[in-house]
Image: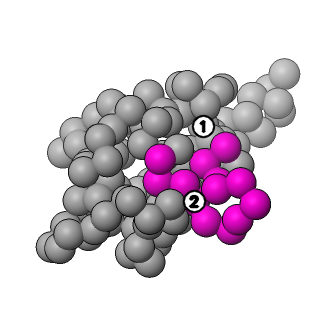
Amino acid sequence: MDSLRVPGSTHISPKRVIAALGIRAKDLSAISNPHGKATIRNPHGSAKLQLALRNLVRILSAAKANHENAEQMLYWFMNYPIPQFYYRTPFELYADARTEELLSLLSIGAHQQAAGEVVGTRRG
């Protein structure tokens, strides 16, 4: 997550997020401000963009626990169809500002994974 930060700043870099996710700048702008024109020319973006980027970092941080490396985590985020959400991807849910629902799903998955590890330990 630190690789997404603007060096020497507390801001998240829109350009680094675009590069990491492999999306276009206008797609990131549309996510952060779907009813207006947001610009990424400012190195930190607008306040709405920074809020959207913080939500993205929250999701990716939670997803990190379920994946072996960043590449797998980003693939999951961009492409994995989630049955509970009519097979929409995490990216689509993020774009629809459904951060809390996605975080709840990740939390449940992490708890189930941890419970499975504890059960597996007891059996072994």
Q: Amino acid at mark 1?
A: Asn
The residue labelled by disc 1 is 66
On-image quarter of the C terminus:
top right
Mark before the other along the chain sequence, 2 or 1: 2
- Residue at disc 2, secondary structure: loop
* Disc 2/disc 1 C-alpha distance (Å): 23 Å
Given this view, does label 2 or label 1 mark the residue nearer the observer?
A: 2
Question: Horizontal and vertical percent for residue 77?
Answer: 42, 39
The correct choice, above or below, for 119 with respect to 8 in the image is: above
Q: Residue 43, relative to residue 3: is it above or below?
A: below
Residue 34 seen in the figure: yes
Q: Are marks 2 and 1 in contact (CB under 8 Å)?
A: no
Q: Which residue is at a point 77% across and 39% down the rendered structure image?
A: 118
Give the residue type at disc 2. Answer: Ile
Question: Splitting the image into 4 quarters, where does residue 89 fall?
Answer: top left
| Rendered location of residue 105, percent (x, y) | 45, 54
The residue that disc 2 covers is 12
Magenta-drawn segment? 3-15
Q: Position of residue 111 (x, y in %)?
A: 62, 50
